[in-house]
Amino acid sequence: MHPNFKAMTAPRPTRRGFMAGSVGLVLGFYLAPKARASVAEDDFAPNAFVRIAPNDTVTVLVKHIEIGQGANTGLPILVAEELDADWAQMRAEQAPSDPVVYVNTAFGIQGTGGSTGLSNSYMTMRQAGAAARAMLVSAAADAWGVPAGEILVERGVIAHEGSGKSSGFGALAAAAAKMPVPVNVVLKDPKEFTLIGGEGITRLDAVAKTNGSALFTIDVFREGMQVIAIVHPPKFGAKVASFDGAAALEMPGVVAVRQVPSGIAVYGANTYAAFRGRDAVSVTWDESGAETRSTDEIARTFAAAARQPARLVSEAGDVETAMQEAVQVIEADYLFPYLAHASMEPLDGVIELGEDGAEVWAGEQIPTISQGTMGGVLGMEPSKIVMNTMFAGGSFGRRATPDSHFAAELANVAKAAGPGAYKLVYTRENDMQAGYYRPLTAHHLKAGLDVEGNITAWTNTIANQSIIAGTPFAMMMKDGLDPTSYEGSNDLAYALPNTRLNWAQMQTGVPTLWWRSVGHTHTAYAVETFLDRVLLASGRDPVEGRMALMREDRPRDAAVLARVAEMAGWSGPGTGDRRMGVAVVRSFGSYVAQIAEVEDRDGSPHVTRVWCAVDCGVAVTPDVIRAQMEGGIGFGLGTLLHDEITLDEGGAVRQANYDGYPILRIDEMPQIEVSILQSDASPTGVGEPGTPPIAPAVANAWRALTGTMPYRLPFGAGEV
Amino acid sequence: MAISLTVNGSPVTLDADPDMPLLWALRDELRLTGTKFGCGIAQCGACTVLLDGQSRRSCVTPIGMLEGADVRTIEDLGGPEAAAVQAAWVDINVPQCGYCQSGQVVSATALLRELPKPTDEDIDNAMAGNICRCATYVRIRQAIRQASDSLEG
């Protein structure tokens, strides 16, 4: 999902910040003083960020879903830092749905995506922690009869040296809740940080995710709950013409078979019954409105479009003249396939439908939109639907659907059956064949060089489907242009004269979606491998050549490149059986450079080592940043080696499970060394930026090794 | 047909279709939800359990063949290897989304019982059946080495 999505909801009155009660101190949304006109006793705050219990535990309500990116660790660290809590007393809990209190300031509604989680919470969560600390100190000062200014807080202990008094947070929580809300809180100078930027932080979800106790949506059971399996059309856009559920209904445990808007739903007493019943349903499909082209045909159309005139995105200088005057012109065509997210937990959700309301357990990245969609299906106010956000077994963008198709389907299977509890679980095959893929994309790049080998012109035409056109996110489009289609191919770090970027908006019946790093999944590969080829043509070193081209106003790109070259001991791509390749990419506000060391293993690239330098502003949790770089590298490496969704002649998806869509495995994973650049800049995301540079870095190394590189992904897919 | 077996040290009787995979019996019948569904065809390893001490994909193991069997799941693997693996997993912050990690921990435990001092190649071979979509593989290797070292000490 993308960060540039703003306000779909009108501003509503702000709410009260604090609540006193038997649970101790509950610190709500930290409100700017002018917004907090009055603090009414009855304005109870279920939408709090911080809870301090009598047993000293500090629970942070995390407004983002935890999909592995570390939200449940990063946000609590911000609170703990300003609260001067001990890390061991911190807990994390997913916040309920509330588009105002738990707004993602980058979107205007509640949502997780675009690598915005940490950046949009950096100040708010620190303020929440600082305010709680101030109230605890006030309570201690009152209780002990000492000046607040003499009280120190350190690692969860409030102490006054002169009187020898000290206390944990819990014992003072109830008194703190009665203290006035601080009008201004002073935040720490970053030099005083003890937790932010520190090492030795254990993820708050690490234990539960190691002993089987972490609860995902699939682990939710409700009284009398039925499990639902779904039969989807074999082609995108096909519809049910007729169906026969008799064979399924004869199976033990199959309760009902019903038609729903998305296909045929099989209701079972348990998952086994529902899945078996699913296989026994026979459906006749109406394919009159279906997408029946193969991906080969779609790819040919897109590749042709990338070589034709297309809409202008940006232009500088005089490209035509520069190309005419060039002594050498280099061109390349690239083709990128549809990609499935293939998260380990297939899409699933639980709904308990009552007469005038519903409760939902799911892993939705944009709960506000899902809630509204389900309200529409069920004919009830969205506020009547209580959303519980569970741990999600991966997402990579898949659980952030602008059309909330899964939430709608969940509501529809409940609506078709009436009040009761239902768990809708996709089989792996459902999940992989449902679409919402990274868009198939073609690039055509062209560069002009002068007699000395300098780049004098650079053009790129991209052909793909828009992810956001026709969705609520279309408001991100400007002048009919979808920046997620080409981000990363304009505003390059390199000072190139005479440039032009064009975009051809293509149409297919295949639903597409953001996929970890969105447009950068293909633009980074096209730009960074093409640049390498151009540098090679003029006999320049990949690192030095890039460095020489770096814009003066892009020092952070240059800095990560310099760091990674130093880490790898770069002195050119090398000469032996192992060669190095480099790529540097800015995405989602973060800067990442990677060098890959590659060898030839049975005709395919095998990556032995990767060095990665990242500048993501203030490094709040270095270990989480390293983990995201490592994971992002593995994720991106899969796009080079394996990942591809194809449609056969007729339009059916060929891949159904992990046997047809291989995921990178441990024996293909390189050793990785990550270095984080010291920075005082505001923190930016790390969930996505680790992914874009790896595939081009590996391809560049492969070219150094073999003289060729793939222009059509994945490796071995053939020519464009 | 009732099937009697031992799950995590306790006797259990399953009165269900003998073709039902162990995965669904554990999850839906016994509510041992740590064992996860990922693919249903023994491709991903999220459903790995210990069956008579050996790692096994529960999604393709019908309960009809488990009369008298001894099953251990992530909730209670027992033994020093599992404890060492789990401690290393937390210490090194292996999990990201966490969904595959039950299976990873079970496979790692089985590996260390078989090979207390695995090489990196042993680790890659033993763990290649377990997919982690978050690609936490670097840390899985590191945690297995650390667990192995801690068992030696």
Image (tube, coloured by chain):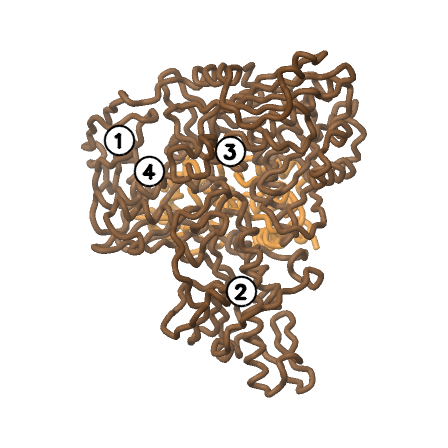
Q: Which residue is mark 3?
A: A483
Splitting the image into 4 quarters, where does residue A183 fall?
bottom right
Q: CA distance from mark 4 to mark 3?
A: 51 Å
Same-chain check, marks 1 and 2: yes
Chain letter for mark 1, please: A
Is residue B29 shown to the viewer in this render?
yes
In terms of depth relative to the viewer, which is nearer, B144 or A337?
A: A337
Kindly indicate whether the residue at mark 3 contacts the one at mark 2 (C-beta within 8 angstroms): no
Q: CA distance from mark 2 to mark 3?
A: 34 Å
Residue A327 appears left or right of A35: right
Q: CA distance from mark 4 to mark 1?
A: 16 Å
Q: Which residue is mark 1?
A: A280
Q: Which residue is mark 4?
A: B19
Pick the quarter of the image with the C terminus of chain A: top right
Q: Earlier in the sequence, mark 3 or mark 1?
A: 1
Residue A402 appears left or right of A160: left
In terms of depth relative to the viewer, which is nearer, A375 or A554?
A: A554
Chain letter for mark 2, please: A
Residue A128: which disc? 2
Which marked residue is nearer to the observer: mark 4 or mark 2?
2
Q: Residues within 10 Å of mark 4 (few under 14, many from 20)?
A: few
Q: Residues within 10 Å of mark 1 (few under 14, many from 20)?
A: some
Q: CA distance from mark 1 to mark 2?
A: 54 Å
| Colour of chain A in the image | brown
**Residue at x-position 22% and y-position 37%:** A257
Which element is circle 3 on? helix
Residue B85's x, y, as percent?
59, 51
